[in-house]
């Protein structure tokens, strides 16, 4: 109380707010305010406004430096965020504002939003009542002297000055230490005259006396007022009685509350009802929308199907089905009808689409896939199977449709059809995962295909159009690699077919080669080539066979084990190869009818046996990858045998005329008739010249044959000659000498080609002569030799 | 007993208290503002204080925004940080986590302040009175301060040790920075003027 009294006389300290916690919040938010001079006590704080909102009601005073309050109720229509300062009014200090600001945030509450609203009623009434009382107390401060001089307000003594003059005294009339002088100085020091003060004293006295000693006077003067008061009190009493009769004010209030409650309920009732209605209407509209779609569905399906927008059809249809599934049993009859209609339309749609798919297998795969997907979505589970079956049937028909094109072209077109459509079939099947079914179909198709191809190939081979075979094999190869994605069983069929065709081709190629070799003889021109190779025929044969083998190599190269896998076929092929190797001998045989060219044939035979056959054997092994070691041996045997025949024929051919000439000469003039020996007898010369002719003939073809041919010829002739000499008994006068000369001359000429046995025999049968005769003979022989030196040289040099 | 008639100082330095929850930001603020120590812990949302102080014989106002340390309010920090001119980054020397988190606070401040490395910033290790429970060594804190190029002050809101020092250090930094910027502005203005003249010539 002491401070409060002082504050009143001292200079007021305005409240200062220096801190606010927190800086933002909504109504009801607890706020701590810090600062200075925030009032001496709870009562001292008259009002507190934050952001211009009154927060006095919930004020809790803690110290003059700290207040706690809550944000007050915000009027309607205020902006959502208000930033403002804190304004505090205290009785002791007056109004002060803050240096800090607060942001009042108001959340907007809608009709449907649940929310809480803060109402604080604690201390509301007590605080209010206390404040009213205090205000009344404050107002009691009066002017006892009743000197109402406005001007006096302007000039006053400073409180400190007065304090100095009147220490421990007070100018307050209510205080114990009241000092009248100070009071007067404080109040009326300026602008008051003595008269005024005197009048005041009188006034004060008068009032004191009137109060204490003249109450009656007072009543008299205020009688009217008193009567008015009594009347009013009476009226109040009457009203109170009346209210009590009407079941008291509380009941009235209760009624008012109930009524207010009802009104509020009614108000919300309306809102809630409207909301419910709105919801109902929305639901109804939604249902109508859905139904509208349903009713329009059949037409829409037809329209979209016609336009080719199948996906749209499917979307519509699935929507309808979802609808049906959701509503289930509860679907009304009308809608059931609509659904039935939809189903019929869909059935038609499916049928048309399926027909479209079936009728044109050439449609691009993507389109087919799309159609299939659509069909499936449209509820046709068997569409893919149906389409696959259809496609399979179509392929079968295509395979049957052989056409008139050449066999190779036919194979080509069949294969490309097969690859394209079988693959498509398989892909279609794999989309719809009906591979098993598709596999069986494909197996059928492939069987049919391989049958057809086999027939075609067989017919091709028959018409000796052999060159197409490797191409066919290549096509099959590409078919195999193209359908690599198919199951193994399918591949096996194609592989088997491929193997088959390969073997057939190989066989036919070899058979064709045999035929070709047979007609080689027509191409013999008997032109001898160098180095004893004979004519060009053996090389023609080699080239022909090598070509064929190269072709076979191409066929076989993808399947190197082909003849090991199929041993029986391998054996057949081997036989064919042997035949082919031998076949040239029959050509030579036919040619040997013409004895004129026996030497060339002999050379050809040698060449074939020594060069061609080993070469071919190597080529065969390289190309066919089969064991050929026996082939060359077998073939060589044939050619060697043939060579022997040829040689014998040739020797016979050449020796016969010589021998007949020799015998004739010996027959007509025997050794006994010879008188004088001057030279060799003519048969010797003939003999040597004939052999030289043979030699030249052979040398034209090949020197390597000389020994083989001349040795038997000479041996036979000299052998026959020796036999003849052995039979002569009578040599006459110079017969022995003549014989000795002839023999020595022949020996000299043919010593290189005659067997030792024959020479010995000749020496035995030759008659003995004397030493002088021998000398004579030597001389004659030397003469004869020198006269035939050219021939003898030829014979010996070739040998050498 | 200061007189209200005096005009409020025009210079206001805006200081923002940052740091993890419970390190003593509010305690430091209240100690600085009202010289009182509050024992009860009540998490702050965001409090605002303003006070006249004499900084090197010049009267200025310090505006302190005491922010929430709790992660719940991390999202609204950006807005507050933007208005700050200087930062007191507080951690508790008895809590290692709070020291680690100063890194994140510094990063957030630099991000908001467009990576201005010279932003007035003081690293404050609070609860110095609880030295027996210390887990963050002076060396570690000083090392971090050295890395960042900032001052490090150890305070106790309870004993008021170094509380004024930390605030005044920051205030000086803010003032110096403002002076620098002002100088720079006048310079650039002069330059602009010169340039304009050149164009005229």
Image (spheres, rainbow, N blue to C red):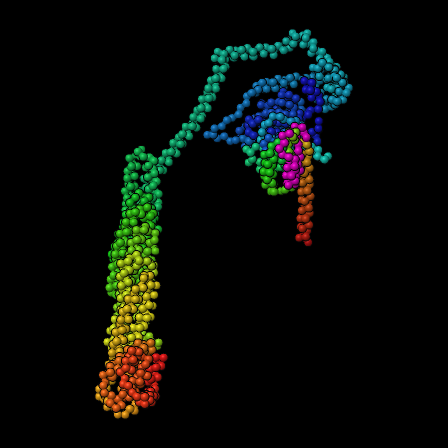
Q: Say which quarter of the image contains residue A347.
A: top left
Tell me residue A608's x, y (percent).
31, 71
- Please state if B112 lies on the left or on the right of A449 as rendered: right
Q: Which image quarter holds the C terminus of chain A?
A: bottom left
- Please state if A768 lies on the left or on the right of A247 as rendered: left
A290 drawn magenta: no
Tell me residue A403's x, y (percent).
25, 60
B156 drawn magenta: yes
Foreground of the two, B53 or A208: B53
Residue placed furthest toward the right: A165
Q: Which image quarter holds the N terminus of chain A?
A: top right
Looking at the image, is A557 positioned above or below residue A33? below
Residue placed furthest toward the bottom: A676
Magenta region: which residues? Answer: B132-161
Is residue A371 in sight in this rendering?
Answer: no
Q: Residue at x 72, y 35 (%)?
A: B56
Is residue A221 in sight in this rendering?
Answer: yes
Foreground of the two, A746 or A771: A771
Q: Residue at x 32, y 51 (%)?
A: A488
Q: Say which quarter of the image contains residue A32.
A: top right
Q: Residue at x 33, y 78 (%)?
A: A703
Foreground of the two, A537 or A754: A754
Q: Say which quarter of the image contains residue A201.
A: top right
Foreground of the two, A317 or A517: A517
Tell me residue B97's x, y (percent).
58, 34
Tell me residue B14's x, y (percent).
64, 35
Q: Residue at x 49, y 28 (%)?
A: A115
- Please state if B194 lies on the left or on the right of A504 as rendered: right
């Amino acid at each position: 109380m002491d401070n409060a009294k002082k504050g009143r006389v001292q200079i007021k300290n305005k409240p200062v707010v220096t801190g606010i916690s927190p800086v933002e919040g909504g109504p009801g938010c607890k706020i701590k305010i810090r600062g200075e001079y925030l009032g001496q006590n709870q009562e001292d704080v008259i009002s507190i406004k934050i952001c211009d909102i009154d927060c006095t009601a919930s004020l809790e005073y803690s110290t003059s430096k700290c207040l706690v309050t809550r944000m007050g109720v915000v009027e309607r229509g205020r902006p959502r965020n208000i930033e403002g300062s804190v304004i505090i009014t205290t009785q002791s200090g007056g109004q002060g504002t803050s240096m800090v600001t607060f942001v009042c945030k108001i959340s907007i509450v809608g009709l449907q939003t649940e929310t809480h609203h803060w109402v604080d009623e604690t201390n509301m009434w007590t605080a209010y009542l206390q404040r009213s009382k205090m205000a009344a107390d404050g107002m009691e401060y009066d002017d006892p002297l009743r000197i109402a001089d406005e001007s006096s307000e302007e000039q006053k003594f400073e409180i400190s000055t007065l304090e100095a003059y009147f220490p421990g005294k007070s100018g307050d009339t209510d205080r114990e230490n009241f000092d009248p002088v100070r009071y007067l100085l404080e109040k009326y020091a300026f602008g008051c005259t003595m008269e005024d003060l005197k009048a005041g004293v009188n006034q004060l006295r008068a009032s004191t006396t009137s109060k204490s000693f003249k109450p009656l006077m007072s009543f008299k003067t205020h009688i009217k007022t008193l009567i008015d008061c009594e009347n009013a009190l009476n009226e109040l009493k009457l009203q109170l009685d009346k209210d009590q009769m009407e079941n008291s004010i509380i009941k009235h209030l209760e009624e008012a509350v109930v009524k207010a409650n009802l009104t509020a309920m009614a108000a919300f009732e309306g809102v809630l009802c409207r909301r419910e209605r709105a919801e109902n209407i929305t639901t109804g509209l939604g249902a109508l929308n859905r139904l509208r779609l349903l009713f329009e569905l059949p037409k829409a399906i037809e329209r979209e199907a016609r336009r080719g927008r199948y996906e749209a059809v499917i979307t519509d249809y699935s929507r309808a089905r979802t609808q049906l599934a959701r509503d289930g049993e509860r679907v009304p009859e009308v809608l059931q009808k609509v659904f039935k209609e939809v189903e019929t339309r869909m059935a038609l749609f499916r049928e048309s689409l399926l027909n479209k798919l079936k009728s044109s297998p050439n449609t691009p795969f993507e389109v087919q896939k799309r159609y299939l997907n659509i069909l499936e979505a449209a509820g046709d589970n068997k569409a893919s199977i149906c389409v696959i079956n259809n496609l399979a049937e179509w392929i079968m028909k295509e395979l049957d449709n052989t056409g008139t094109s050449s066999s190779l072209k036919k194979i080509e077109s069949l294969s490309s059809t097969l690859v394209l459509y079988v693959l498509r079939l398989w892909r279609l099947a794999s989309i719809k995962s009906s591979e098993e079914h598709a596999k069986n179909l494909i197996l059928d198709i492939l069987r049919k295909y391989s049958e057809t191809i086999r027939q075609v190939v067989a017919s091709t081979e028959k018409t000796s159009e052999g060159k197409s075979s490797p191409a066919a094999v290549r096509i099959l190869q590409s078919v195999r690699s193209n359908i690599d994605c198919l199951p193994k069983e399918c591949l096996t069929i194609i592989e088997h077919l491929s193997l088959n065709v390969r073997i057939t081709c190989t066989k036919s190629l070899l058979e064709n080669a045999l035929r070709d070799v047979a007609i080689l003889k027509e191409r013999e021109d008997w032109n001898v080539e160098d180095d004893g190779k004979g004519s060009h025929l053996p090389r023609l044969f080699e080239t022909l066979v090598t070509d064929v083998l190269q072709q076979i190599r191409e066929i076989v190269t993808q399947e190197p084990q082909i003849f090991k896998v199929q041993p029986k076929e391998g054996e057949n092929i081997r036989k064919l190869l042997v035949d082919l190797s031998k076949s040239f001998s029959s050509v030579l045989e036919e040619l040997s009818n013409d004895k004129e060219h026996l030497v060339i044939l002999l050379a050809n035979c040698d060449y074939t046996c020594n060069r061609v056959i080993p070469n071919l054997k190597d080529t065969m092994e390289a190309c066919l990858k089969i064991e050929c070691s026996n082939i060359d041996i077998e073939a060589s045997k044939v050619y060697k045998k043939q060579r022997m025949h040829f040689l014998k024929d040739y020797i016979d051919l050449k020796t016969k005329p010589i021998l007949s000439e020799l015998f004739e000469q010996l027959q007509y003039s025997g050794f006994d008739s010879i008188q004088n020996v001057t030279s060799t007898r003519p048969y010797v010369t003939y003999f040597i010249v004939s052999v030289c002719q043979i030699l030249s003939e052979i040398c034209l073809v090949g020197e390597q044959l000389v020994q083989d041919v001349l040795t038997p010829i000479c041996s036979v002739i000299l052998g026959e000659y020796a036999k003849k000499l052995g039979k002569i008994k009578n040599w006459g006068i110079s017969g022995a000498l003549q014989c000795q000369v002839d023999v020595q001359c022949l020996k000299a000429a043919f010593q290189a080609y005659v067997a030792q046995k024959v020479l010995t025999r000749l020496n035995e049968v030759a008659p003995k002569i004397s030493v002088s005769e021998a000398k004579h003979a030597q001389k004659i022989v030397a003469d004869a030799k020198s006269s035939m030196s050219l021939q003898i040289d030829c014979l010996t040099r070739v040998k050498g | 007993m200061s007189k209200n008639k005096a005009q409020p100082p025009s210079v206001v330095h805006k200081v923002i208290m940052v740091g993890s929850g419970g390190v003593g930001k509010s305690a430091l603020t209240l100690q600085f503002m009202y010289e009182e120590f509050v024992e009860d812990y009540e998490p702050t949302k965001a409090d605002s204080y303003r006070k006249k102080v004499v900084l090197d014989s010049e009267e200025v106002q310090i505006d302190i925004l005491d922010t929430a340390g709790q992660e719940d309010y991390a999202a609204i920090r950006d807005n507050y940080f933007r208005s700050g001119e200087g930062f007191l980054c507080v951690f508790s020397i008895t809590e290692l986590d709070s020291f680690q988190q100063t890194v994140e606070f510094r990063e957030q401040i630099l991000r908001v302040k467009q990576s201005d490395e010279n932003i007035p910033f003081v690293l404050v290790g609070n609860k110095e009175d609880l030295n027996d429970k210390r887990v963050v060594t002076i060396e570690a804190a000083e090392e971090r301060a050295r890395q960042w190029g900032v001052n490090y002050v150890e305070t106790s809101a309870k004993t008021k040790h170094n509380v004024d020092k930390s605030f005044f250090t920051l205030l000086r930094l803010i003032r110096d920075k403002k002076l620098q910027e002002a100088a720079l502005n006048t310079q650039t203005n002069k330059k602009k003027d010169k340039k304009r003249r050149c164009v005229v010539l």
